Every structure is written in structure tokens, then in C-alpha cells.
Image (tube, grey):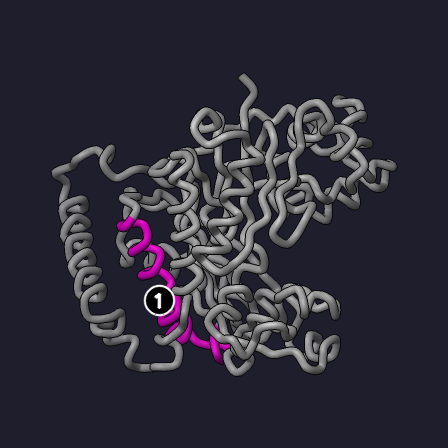
Amino acid sequence: MERVILHSDLNNFYASVECLYNPKLRGKPVAVAGDPEHRHGIVLAKNYEAKAFGVATGDPLWMARKKCPHILFTPPHYDLYMRYSEMARNIYSEYTDLVESFGLDECWLDVSGSTGLFGSGQKIADELRRRIHFELGVTASVGVSFNRVFAKLGSDMKKPDATTVIDSTHFRDIIWPLPVSDLLYVGKATTRKLAGYGIRTIGDLAQTDTNFLNRLLGKNGLMLWLFANGRDTSEVSGFGSKGIVKTIGNSTTAPRDLVSDEDIKIPLYVLSESVAERLRACDFLCRTVQISIRDNRLQSCERQGRLSVPSCTAKDIFDRAFSLYKENRPEHPVRSLGVRACNLMVQEVQQLSLYQEAVTQQKQEELERTVDGIRKRFGHFSLQRGLMLTDPALSALDPVNDHVIHPEAFLKGKG
């Protein structure tokens, strides 16, 4: 039986939620933007009215205002976005338990086993769009196909509030004329590399010799060839699947340049605590810690190192992250930092130990879980490290969560 895969994309998600909560923004060009006073002055999301003026995600605010002088900026409210994302997933779960998130605003659904109850893939997609609009007040575009890659292509083809069906019989007529950059995991560098050999459309890619693609792009070349020919066989992971998570990370941009080690310690602890709390919430341990450093000349580097034993404590993550920083201290003051837990393992499979190091780590974990409970009940700032009081501006940084990283997503943006 042929699979029926849906990809639902909530249209202009951040901006749509902001307009929903602030009627004064409706019908006007709007951009969700960071705080320029804290050096987050870029467009994070925009609505269609702003897009019509050429405003793009990642534009500095001055550029967005130059393109659209009467644009309205609003700060992000991530708690709202997460709530609406969860409500959308609750709707999806009424049709299938095979729902896989791809960021806050996108999900794949495998409804192959649900068509007998709810009708065809197109009928389910139309029903999802109607319910999302009626129950949440935002719109979604849904792609329907026989694999994940084409389902996502379908959701991108018609916006807003549309259903696009790409079936196995006619996919070449629909997909092959599209630019190769529309294909999932084809980044700017890969697009340029392929264009240098005259491969500009998905059809060109599909008809290219696989040996040549392997020489040009390595194993990713074969993967993209399979995608272009409709041979994606990857499964949609169900609710509760932890195996899809590969890293958990946070990053932040400081309100001022970080010059000394003491400056670095505060945001590094903020990030380490956030990452560790998320690890514990998911019952994960990490074996490797990665840091990213960007200086005030916007030069970046990433370094990683293994932990002596797998851990989910902020202390272990901070200690490794800080040692990595000292080993790779940049010449210029630091503008932004990131901390990521990698090489994850599910906690219940950890081997028990009677060594003193393991006992000490267990006590530290119990202490930090107690802190989690206090902060959940009384607020995050109800309990802080003494170090945080030395610079309230740095200790009040708001870390930005990475999206859940899927195995395939390591290819995204690398090519």
C-alpha cells in the first residue's frame, strides 16, 4: 500500500500569532524582531504584507525599514508560539500518532493507516486546515504526497491556506521543473555547485549520473538524487520518540562585548543551565559538549570536547564549555556564545557505578533537579547563582533554543 504523508506548515507563524493577539497589527506590514538595544536587531519573521515590500527574514531592522518605511516591529513571544505549536500538534494527533515536528511551525504526519477512518490524504489535509483556522485563528499550508520530501515541497508551493497534492503518477510534471534549491537539504553552496555543472532544476538533478553526483557531493549526492526521483523512504517518527533528537543547544547575544573570563562565565552558566534543564526534562545524558563563539568582528568558531562520564548537570556542561573557551579564546571581544549538548543517550540505560566521581555527579544532579522544581514553582529567577548577581544585565540573558535536530538535518545548510 502506498504511503500517505502530509506536511503541515503554519503560515508566517510568529507574525500570525502576534497579529492574532494584537488587532492593531492586522492588515499592516509587520515583522517580529529582536531588541536592537540588546543587539538582536534583525527580522525574525514577517507577514505577507511586509514580504510584499521585499522584507526578508534576517534583514537588519534599518534595512527592513528602508524597504518598508511604515513597517511595524513587535518583539517575539516564544511562550505563545510554543503554546500554539502544541495546540496544532494536538489537532494532528487526533488523526495519527505518527507526527514529527520540524521546528515549531512545521510537522510531518503519516496518515497511511487513517484514510479508512477520515478519507483521502487531501480530505484530511483540508480538514486540518479548516480546524487550524477555526480553532487557532492562524492558517496552514499542507502538502500531500507519498513521501516526506515531496509532502514538504507541496506545502511550500501554495501559500497561504492551501492544500497541494503530489502523487506518484504525476510528480515529475509537478516537481521536476522546480529549481533545485527548492529540494529539502539543498543549501546555497550546493545550489551554486550544481549550477556550475548546469544542474538547475530538480529534473536536471534527477537525470544526472549518480557516479558523477557521488564525486561532486559525496554520499549526499546520491541521497539528493533519490529525493529528486521520489525514492525517499524515511519514516515519520511518532510521539514520544527520543531517538530523533541528536543535540540540544542554546545560544545568546550579549548586550555588550565580553572581554574578561568573568564576563564569559555568566552567559556560559546561563546557557549551560538551560541546556542541562532541557536534557533532564527529556531524560537525556550527553557525552559531548560543543561551544560556538562569535567575536565582535563576526568571526565564528565551534569546538567540542567529550565529558569524562555522560552527564545532564549544568556544572559538568559549564566546566567543559569553559575549558573549551579557554583553549580557543579569540583575539577580539566576544559578541555571542552558544552551548550544545551532543552525542546524547537515554538516561535509563546508563550503567550504574559505585566510584566516587559517579556518586558526586548523582548528588549534583539531584541538587539541580531540586532547583528545577523550585524555579518551575516560583519562577526562574527565584533561585540564582551568586555569580549572576555581579552583572544583572548578563544574567538576565534570554537563551534562544535550537530546534530539535533530526538525523537528516545535519545536512541542512552545510551543502
Instruction: Decide if residue 41 is on the left or right side of residue 22.
Output: right
Residue at (34% x, 44% y) in the render: 286
* Drawn side of residue 43 relative to residue 309, left or right: right
Q: How many marks?
A: 1
* Residue occupying the point 68% across, 48% down: 158
Q: Overall secondary structure of the magenta stretch? A: helix
Q: Quadrant of residue 412?
A: top right
Residue 142 quadrant: top right
Please name the residue shown 68% across and 69% down the image. Answer: 49
Considering only vertical position in the picture, is 118 above or below 181? above
Q: Position of residue 165 (x, y in %)?
A: 65, 35
User: Residue 320 vs residue 177: left or right?
Assistant: left
Across and down, in percent, residue 232 comes to 60, 27
Q: Amino acid at mark 1?
A: Val
Q: Nearer the viewer, residue 83 or 263?
A: 83
Which element is circle 1 on?
A: helix
Q: Which residues are magenta?
A: 254-281
Q: Which residue is disc 1 drawn over? A: 270
Residue 325: in sight, yes or no? no
Answer above or below: position of 174 versus 15.
above
Q: Relative to residue 37, is residue 170 depicted above or below? A: above
> Where residue 18 appears, x then y in whole percent?
50, 69
- Magenta run includes residue 274: yes
The crowding category of the residue bearing disc 1, from other C-alpha atoms within 10 Å (few below 14, some 14 to 19, many at least 20), is many
